[in-house]
Amino acid sequence: MKITDSIPKMTDTHTDNRNSNPGATIRALRRSADMTLAQLSAKTGLAASTLSKLEAGHISPSFDKLAAISRGLDVDMTELLGSPPQAPAPAPISIGRRVVLRAGEGQHVETRSYSQTYLATELLHKKMTPMVVEVHARTMDEFLAEFGDFIRHPGEEFVYIIEGEVEFCTDLYAPIRLCAGDSLYFDSEMGHAYLKASDVPCRIVAAAAPRGSVEPMIDTFVSMSEKGTAAAEGQPSEARPRRSPRAK
């Protein structure tokens, strides 16, 4: 089955299919859960003031913040990127589902290290999270300045390089250079990072699947970007990232 005619580019031309400011949705989900900003702050590690600014649309939501909020609210992150909820979501359907995305469509999330476009976001309770990623960080110093540590999440991940060259770094192996047409399948509980290794744009297609659960792998992320940035800026220790064990 042909899902889409081409790999979507990292553009913002199709704004009708995305919610660039999910603050209203986050507020509605928090209130429907009868949760205060302080309670959500305790669950996510994000400051209540940051959550308030996100809900009001005063700051842009990065991937790690959305992931932390989805975990704190116990919802699929795609629910944060959609319209404010009007009714309970229907029960997940296990067969006969399909979704078509045209070039340029998808949910876009921007961080300093990555530009990510999430695909098939209309489907909740997916068993994998497909995405197109443009890699920006060129060095581990740049990457760690944002995240404070390698990224880890339970499960497995597949990546295919579609443009440029990527240096794949982990906490267990020496870095490896991947070129357009190369692919990699790995245990994503291993600390890992993608770095830009060429002057041309570096774009990959990735799909991450959890291990032992049908919950999205993004629910396992901690707000590493905000905490890593806070540590770099010398903010209080409670904002500093917690290092995860190499294996869980």
Image (cartoon, helix red, strand yellow):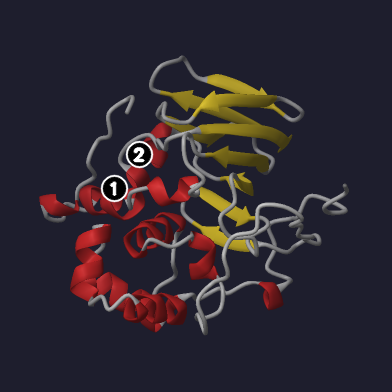
Q: Mark 2, residues whose alpha carbon is within 10 Å: few (<14), some, or many (≥20)? A: many
Query: Is residue 91 shown left or right of residue 57?
Result: right
In the rendering, at what x and y percent does residue 165 appear? 66, 31
Q: In the rendered view of the protein, which quadrant contains the C terminus?
A: top left
Tell me whether the residue at label 2 lies in contact with that at label 1, contact meaning CB atoms closer than 8 angstroms. Answer: yes
Q: Is residue 185 above or below residue 86?
A: above
Instruction: Tell me which amino acid carries mark 2.
Output: Leu
In the rendering, at what x and y percent does residue 193 appear? 47, 33
Query: Is residue 191 shown left or right of residue 49?
Result: right
Instruction: Give me the residue at 58% from left, 74% from top.
Output: 19
In the rendering, at what x and y percent does residue 117 appear? 62, 56
Q: Mark 1, residues whose alpha carbon is within 10 Å: few (<14), some, or many (≥20)? A: many
Instruction: Give me the residue at 33% from left, 81% from top.
Output: 31
- Of 126 and 49, which appears nearest the observer? 126
Q: Is residue 43 above or below residue 174?
A: below
The local secondary structure at tag 1 comes to helix
Instruction: Give me the residue at 72% from left, 25% from top.
Output: 182
Instruction: Give me the residue at 11% from left, 55% from top.
Output: 236
Instruction: Tell me which amino acid carries mark 1.
Output: Gly
Q: Is residue 58 visible?
A: no
The local secondary structure at tag 2 comes to helix
Q: Is residue 183 visible?
A: yes
Q: Which picture quadrant has residue 99?
A: bottom right
Q: Is residue 102 above or below residue 1?
A: below
Q: Which residue is mark 1?
A: 228
The numbered disc on residue 5 is: none
Q: Which residue is mark 2?
A: 144
- Of 76 and 228, which appears nearest the observer? 76
